[in-house]
Image (spheres, rainbow, N blue to C red):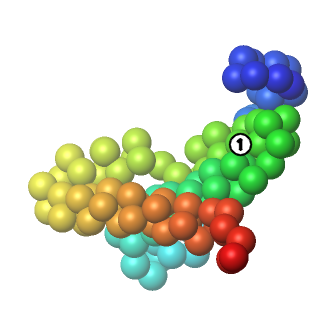
């Protein structure tokens, strides 16, 4: 698994991660939707953005081969299956949902940056 090209292993990692991520999202939505129907979609997207930021930061600490495996499973697969910004786009078709949608995008960006900052490599103090 070298470089950025596709390999059978990388495709399987993305597939496995996407399967797990989607299942976790569906379970989380099943818990939240009956209580607060509009909250699950923004929550999974913001949480997924944070976790993707953490994944990217942690992968940057790894040797390239391990970073590729980590990114394929956790990043593209798991967080790709867990988040659902396409559903947010459909949700946004209702004008009443636009404030929640806009806040979700802004909060997702902030969460991704927070995840990157939290998990980034620390510089040694002199």
Which residue is most to the bottom? 35
Q: Quadrant of residue 41?
A: bottom left
Q: Position of residue 51 (x, y in %)?
A: 60, 61
The one of 86 and 26 positioned closer to us in this rendering: 86
Q: Which residue is mark 1?
A: 71
In this rendering, would 26 be left or right of 100? right
The one of 54 and 20 positioned closer to us in this rendering: 54
Q: Residue at x 54, y 67 (%)?
A: 117
Q: Residue at x 29, y 52 (%)?
A: 91
Q: Is residue 17 above or below residue 55?
A: above
Helix, strand or loop at label 1? It is helix
In this rendering, would 71 be left or right of 81? right
In this rendering, would 78 be left or right of 40? right
Q: Residue at x 69, y 49 (%)?
A: 60
Residue 31 visible in the picture: yes
Residue 16 visible in the picture: no
Q: Position of residue 32 (x, y in %)?
A: 51, 75
The quadrant of the rendering that contains the C terminus is bottom right
The one of 76 and 38 positioned closer to us in this rendering: 76
Residue count near mark 1 (Cα–Cα under 10 Å), binned few <14, some 14–19, many ≥20: many
The quadrant of the rendering that contains the N terminus is top right
Q: How many marks?
A: 1
Which residue is most to the left? 95
Q: Residue at x 64, y 56 (%)?
A: 57
Q: Position of residue 83 (x, y in %)?
A: 52, 52
Q: Position of residue 104 (x, y in %)?
A: 33, 62
Q: Quadrant of residue 99?
A: bottom left
Q: Is residue 24 above or below residue 16?
A: below
């Amino acid at each position: 698994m070298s470089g950025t090209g596709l390999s059978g292993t990388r495709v399987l990692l993305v597939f496995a991660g996407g399967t797990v991520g989607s299942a976790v999202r569906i379970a989380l939505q099943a818990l939240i939707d009956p209580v607060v129907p509009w909250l699950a979609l923004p929550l999974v997207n913001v949480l997924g953005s944070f976790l993707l930021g953490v994944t990217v930061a942690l992968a940057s600490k790894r040797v390239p081969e391990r970073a590729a495996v980590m990114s394929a499973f956790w990043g593209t697969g798991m967080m790709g299956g867990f988040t659902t910004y396409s559903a947010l786009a459909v949700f946004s078709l209702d004008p009443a949902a636009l404030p929640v949608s806009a806040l979700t995008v802004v909060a997702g960006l902030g969460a991704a940056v927070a995840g990157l900052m939290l998990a980034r490599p620390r510089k040694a103090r002199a």
